[in-house]
Image: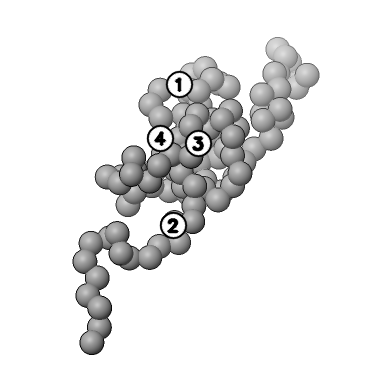
Amino acid sequence: MEKVIKGTDEIPTKFEEFKIVGVKYEDKFEKKTFTGREYSYYTDLDLEIGDIVEVPTRYGKSIAMVTKINIDKNEIEKIKEYMKVIDTKLDKNEFLKEENSDGIKG
């Protein structure tokens, strides 16, 4: 006799071993600043608060800063089917380097 699976809690997924982090997207008008609402993502990367990551969005890839780590899976219960995975961590120092007025990094 086969076991009947009810609900999504019993369905094994590859996301069970992933960590959950919160990020804020880079401001479109003020580059290298991260404002607005926090969004939750899955990741298997070792991330810390302040890390810069590339995140998938409905509009393509965006840059974001990790603002929260170790989010409990109960906090994302209502949105977990919409969540995406972060798989790219950027070099924070390289990303935050300033450009002078000639467009040359310094």
Left or right: 34 in relation to 39: right
Few, some or many residues within 10 Å of mark 3 (<14, 14–19, 20+): some
Between the residue at mark 3 and the residue at mark 2, the CA separation in whole angstroms equals 16 Å
Q: Residues within 10 Å of mark 2 (few under 14, many from 20)?
A: few
Kind of residue indicated by mark 1: Thr
Q: Earlier in the sequence, mark 3 or mark 4?
A: 4
Q: Residue furthest top?
A: 101
User: Left of 15 or right of it: where is 81?
Assistant: left
Of the pair 101 and 20, the residue shown nearer to us: 20
Q: Nearer the viewer, residue 48 or 54?
A: 48
Whether the residues at callouts 1 and 3 have beta carbons within 8 Å, the answer is no
The residue indicated by pointer 2 is 16
Secondary structure of the residue carrying tag 2 is: helix
9 is higher (above) or lower (below) than 19 = below
Instruction: Please tell me which residue is depicted at 61% across the width and 44% down the height of the picture.
Output: 46
User: In the rendering, at what x and y percent does residue 28 appear?
Assistant: 48, 24
Q: Quadrant of the C terminus?
A: top right
- Identify which residue is drawn at 32% across, 52% down: 81
Would you name the residue on which mark 3 appears?
Answer: 69
Q: Amino acid at mark 2?
A: Glu
* Residue type of the residue flagged with mark 4: Tyr
Q: Earlier in the sequence, mark 2 or mark 4?
A: 2
